[in-house]
Image (cartoon, coloured by chain):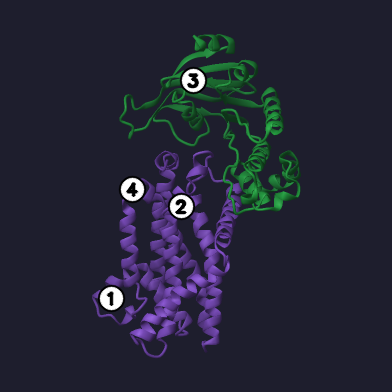
Amino acid sequence: MTTLLRFEGVGLRYTNDRRGSPWTLQDVSFDVQSGETLGIIGRNGAGKSSLLRLMSGLIAPDAGRIVRHTESILLLSIQLGFQSHLTGRENAMLSGILLGMRAAEVRAAMNDIIDFAELGDQIDDPVRTYSAGMRGRLGFAVACQARPEVLLIDEALSVGDRVFREKSRKYLLERLQSEQTAVVVSHDEKLIANECNRVIWLADGGIKACGAPEDVLEQYRR
Amino acid sequence: MRFRKRHAELLYHCALSELKRDSDRAYFGMLWWVLDPLIYLATFYLIFEVILQRGGPGFVHFLLTGLVFWRWFDSSVRLSAFSIRRYNGIISQVYLPKMLLPLIIVTSNLMKFGLVLTLFTVFLLVSGYSPAESWLAIPVLLLTQLVLVVGASLLVAAVIPLVPDLMQLVNYGMTLMFFMSGIFFRVSSVDEPLRSVLYFNPMAGMLSAWREVLLSQAYPAWSQLAYVLACGLVLGALGSWLLNRFDLRYPRLVN
């Protein structure tokens, strides 16, 4: 196992926030090992999403440092960059490239995307004619094609009807159980307990506990 | 900045999407790419030629040449000011080199301008101007103005999200430039020292060069073009430095 990502005393502050402590995150240190699934739990506003944004390299920390051994870290985003005036196919291309793929890769995966999204010929209709469910399915199908070294997942990604939700959940679980390195933010304690190798409990911008899922979840529930 | 080959693909597909958005929005669709500049030009024609009866022979061509090339600069710069905010939803989810965003706007605008330029050339030919040897300089002029357009767009795109209040200044600045670029008058016939002051504005020299080449069948003043190019490079260097410097700051600013 090698370390792909390490946080060393990382702090993040929003200077225009004058309520209480300006620090959204303070003195956060941990690492992500290749192949593991790391869970992050915590109440709303604990800094979970900020942590993901720092990991994915969207923003820089205000204190400490982040050591990256890979540049391929992706926050899984559904319907990223979707434009209602473009067709499903054009959106799949745009979204795929935004998610780090090359145009040729998206083109090669297009049939799989259409199949997974269950869109058939409607792939060439403008997305504004789609139902919310169709849009979500296409977004999910494209996002599935991204192959980052570290996959960041924020909350349960449930889209579409019950059948598709089941299908997408099954797909994600398969990904998590594979060699895929992943960081999952979720309120779903069952998912965290079953799928994660390690769990971090984030509270008030700091790490309250870190370790095996059952131990951390037990403290968290108290 | 982490610039990759895929970012070139992204530039292309995003610019295409911008173009398709325009054509999708209105009932007339792509026709607006032509109608919009046509109405713009017709308005000025009406005011100066019909109402004010200014000018004299050749004034229409003089005016339209100025307006066509001014409009390319003006629309690119104004749209670029909001390019980072326009892609806010995307840059808060995936990393993109922020320099890409004004370049998307400039590219889609360039494609639209290409159409206008083609129509304008047809207009020149139909109305009695024949291609001269001086037209060989057109690619040089296009490239020079492109450098200026890109440079100014990068700078404005970088600065406005950092200091939103400056947008007012940009608006006034562009209006001032519009009147001082010699769209309605010949900068070369203004008396010194005012003439040198006016030529400080790179668009003044740029528009003179276009008229020389297209209308007077003469080569442009190369030193003036060199000055325009230098302005574009300086603005662009400053803009890209800022965009890089605050690359990871913008997603936190525009939320």
Give the distance between the C-alpha atoms of the residues marked 3 and 4, in whole angstroms: 35 Å
Query: As shown in the figure, which amino acid type bears the numbered disc 4?
Result: Val
Q: Check disc 3 and report the residue beneath it.
A: A42
Give the distance between the C-alpha atoms of the residues marked 4 and 1, in whole angstroms: 33 Å
- What is the letter of the purple chain? B
Between circles 2 and 3, the one closer to the viewer is 3
Q: Secondary structure at mark 4?
A: loop
Task: Inspect this view and state whether residue B126 appears.
Answer: yes
Binning the other alpha carbons within 10 Å of mark 1 as few (below 14), some (14 to 19) or many (20 upward) gives: some
Q: Position of residue B136 (x, y in %)?
A: 54, 78
Binning the other alpha carbons within 10 Å of mark 2 as few (below 14), some (14 to 19) or many (20 upward) gives: many
Q: Which mark is residue B195?
A: 1
Q: Chain of mark 4?
A: B
Between circles 1 and 2, the one closer to the viewer is 2
Q: Which mark is residue A187?
A: none
Q: Observer-nearest residue: B59 or A78?
A: A78
Residue drawn where x is 42% and y is 74% of the image:
B67
Q: Check disc 2 and report the residue beneath it.
A: B83
Give the distance between the C-alpha atoms of the residues marked 2 and 3, in whole angstroms: 35 Å
* Displayed quadrant of residue A181: top right
Give the distance between the C-alpha atoms of the residues marked 4 and 2, in whole angstroms: 14 Å
Q: Observer-nearest residue: A113 or B161?
A: A113
Q: Which mark is residue B163?
A: 4
